[in-house]
Amino acid sequence: MSAPTGSSRPSRPLTKRFGSWTTGVPAGSTADSRLLDTPPSSDFTHTDPWRVMRIQSEFVQGFDSLAEIGPAISVFGSARTKPDSPHYQTGVDVGRLLVEAGVAVITGGGPGSMEAANRGASEAGGLSIGLGIELPFEQGMNQWVALGVGFRYFFARKTMFVKYAQGFVVLPGGLGTLDELFEAMVLVQTSKVTQFPIVLVDTAFWSPLLDWIRDTMVAEGLVSPGDMDIVQLADTPEEAVSLVMAGEAGTKVGAVPRA
Ligand SMILES: CC(C)=CCNc1ncnc2c1ncn2[C@@H]1O[C@H](COP(=O)(O)O)[C@@H](O)[C@H]1O
């Protein structure tokens, strides 16, 4: 088919596939010139369509930063754990043992148990990763993070915890820790992720929660009895690391040349 020429050329349709952008624009302007014009107001950066672009960029930034980290385990736990707490030492030991087992350590990059796990990983010479989150009471990334990625949105950040780790170790924590734990449990329960070990450290801390799930949720038929097997309990860092490494992370370690 030949290109239309002269007077036989069809008139341009007013409405294009991406909207009616040919109407209401200054005569003689182009997409380029409109892009380069200074807008009268920056209010558009606070609109949902603009936020979608920002959310998209968080995924791109996360994928770009983490695509080559190799096998990794995410470690969660309270932001409030003090350095003199036994939980802090557990976090340090878990971080170190994971690195010795051949995997990178991913945390939320904050203080407390996150800092502890990053510290253990860093001191053991491993890859210590922090996925920070913008919070109203900003604390910044802990000093033991070597590869830090900042997020504004919890949901984008949570995708990275799962996508780039082959298992979770969960230390005692509060609502943030429970949020991350239950997200992972649901992903396993609904087969969105498979072979994904989730190890809870400190039987005394976690047992009341597991008892309630068993005695109330399972008893009322809201959760299958088999769902209790989604998590495993450990009482020492050694036990936790050995359980979590028995999953896919363990099989991946052999496939990745150690530095
Ligand atoms: C002292 C304080 C509250 C600092 C908050 N600073 C934080 N920085 C980074 N991640 C966080 C922070 N607070 C909560 N989280 C996320 O939620 C979990 C801890 O929350 P929580 O303390 O258990 O409920 C962490 O695994 C982390 O991914």
Image (cartoon, helix red, strand yellow):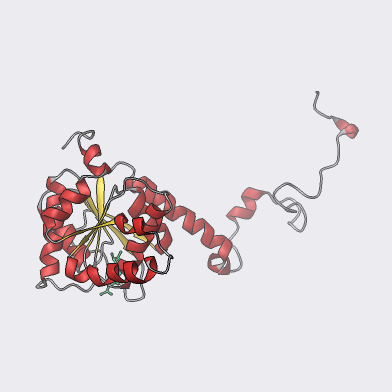
- Relative to 243, does residue 248 appear above or below in the rendering? above
Q: Nearer the viewer, residue 130 or 244?
A: 244
Going 10% across and 69% down the picture, which residue do you hit?
86
User: Residue 85 vs residue 181: left or right?
Assistant: left
Residue 162, x across and y down, in percent:
35, 52
Where is residue 21? Give x, y as percent: 72, 53
Residue 7 in the image: above or below residue 31: above
Q: Please state, as top left, top right, bottom left or bottom right, where the C terminus lies in the image.
A: top left
Q: Residue at x 15, y 62 (%)?
A: 91
Q: Quadrant of the N terminus?
A: top right
The image quadrant that residue 118 belongs to is bottom left
Report the side of 224 relative to 142 (left or right): right
Where is 129 relative to 86, above or below?
above
Q: Residue at x 37, y 52 (%)?
A: 188
Residue 107 image position (x, y, % from top left): 26, 58
What number of labels is visible? 0
